[in-house]
Amino acid sequence: TGTGRDDRGAAGGRQERGQGAGGGGGRRAGEETAGETGGETGVASPLPVFLFPSELVFYSEQRNSHRRVLTLYNPYRFRISFKMLCTAPSLYRVVEAEGSVRAKSCVDLVVRHLDVSPRNWGRRDRFRMEVRGGGQVGEREIWAELRGGGEEGGGGGEQEEEERKRSKRGGGQQRAMSPLSPLLVPTQTHLQLPTCTAVRSVSQWVVCVLVAVLCVTVLMLPLHTETSSMVPGCLHVSTNQKLACAYTLGLLTIVFLR
C-alpha cells in the first residue's frame, strides 16, 4: 500500500512539472508572437515629402540671393505637420521652421543666410524636413551652399523676382494649390483646331462687314418726317434707328482698326 501511494505521488509530480513546462513554453511563444506583431504595427510607412527647390544656393555679392524660399506642398487629404532641422543653425534663420499645412495647400518657408563672409564660401550645409500626418512619417534632405561672387548670367532674374514677392508676403502663409490639369495629347482633332479657328474668324469678318454695310445703308435712308419721291415711305427710318446704327458702326470701326 505504501509503495502504491509513492508511485501515485511520483506520477502526479511528473504531471505537474510537465504542465508547468508546457505553460511556460506557451507563454514564451505568446510573448514572441506579440513582440513580432507589435514590431510590425509600430513601424509607420514612409510619407513622400514634396519640397522645392531641391537645393539652395546663396551668393555673397548678390544681396537678393541671401534670402531663399522653400515651398512645402501638401497634396494629401489630411493635415501634415513639419519641422525643419539644419546642421548649422547659427548660420541660417528659417521663418516658421515648425508648423502644419492643411490639406491640398502649400506653405512658403523663407531661409536667410546670416553670415556670407569669405570664410564660409564653398561651405555646404544640410537641411532636413521632417513631416508627419495620416499616421505616417517622412523626411527629405536638401543642400545649401554659399558661393563667392555673384550669379553668372541673368537667367535667375525671374526666379529671384518670384522669390522676392513670396518673401514679402511673409513666410508661413498657406495658400491653396492649383488644381492639376491633364496634359493634352496632340491628336488629329487637335491638329485640325487651327483650321477651324481660321474658318470661324473668316465667317466672323463676313458677318461684321455685312452688318457695317447694313448700318451705312440705314444711315443713308431719309427720316420718316421727310418726304422723298425716290424712296418709298416704308423705308423711312426714325432718328433712334439712325442713332443705333451709328453706334453699331462705331463699334465695328474699332474692331476693323484692331
Image: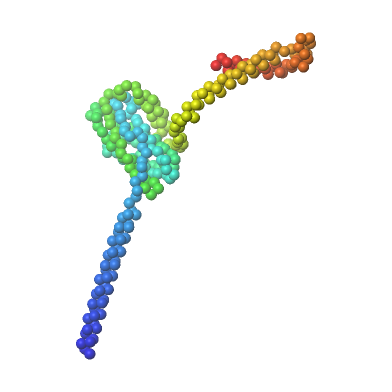
Residue 41 location (% of width, % of height): 34, 54
Q: Residue furthest top?
A: 229
For the residue pair 199 and 15, the one nearer the viewer reads as 199
Image vertical order of residue 87 relative to residue 65, above or below: below
As rendered, which of 205 and 4 lies closer to the eye? Answer: 205
The residue located at (27%, 68%) in the rendering is 24
- In the figure, 207 relative to 103: above or below? above
Q: Judge whether residue 109 can be spotted in this image.
A: no
> Is residue 225 depicted above or below 62 in this figure?
above
Tell whether 183 sits left or right of 41. Answer: right
The residue at the point 29 percent across, 33 percent down is 144
Q: Quadrant of residue 22?
A: bottom left
Name the quarter where the N terminus is drawn. bottom left
Left or right: 6 with respect to 194? left
- Location of residue 53 in the rendering, given as x and y in whole percent from the top left corner: 35, 33
234 with respect to 170 (left or right): right
What residue lies at 29% left-to-right and 66% top-to-bottom? 27
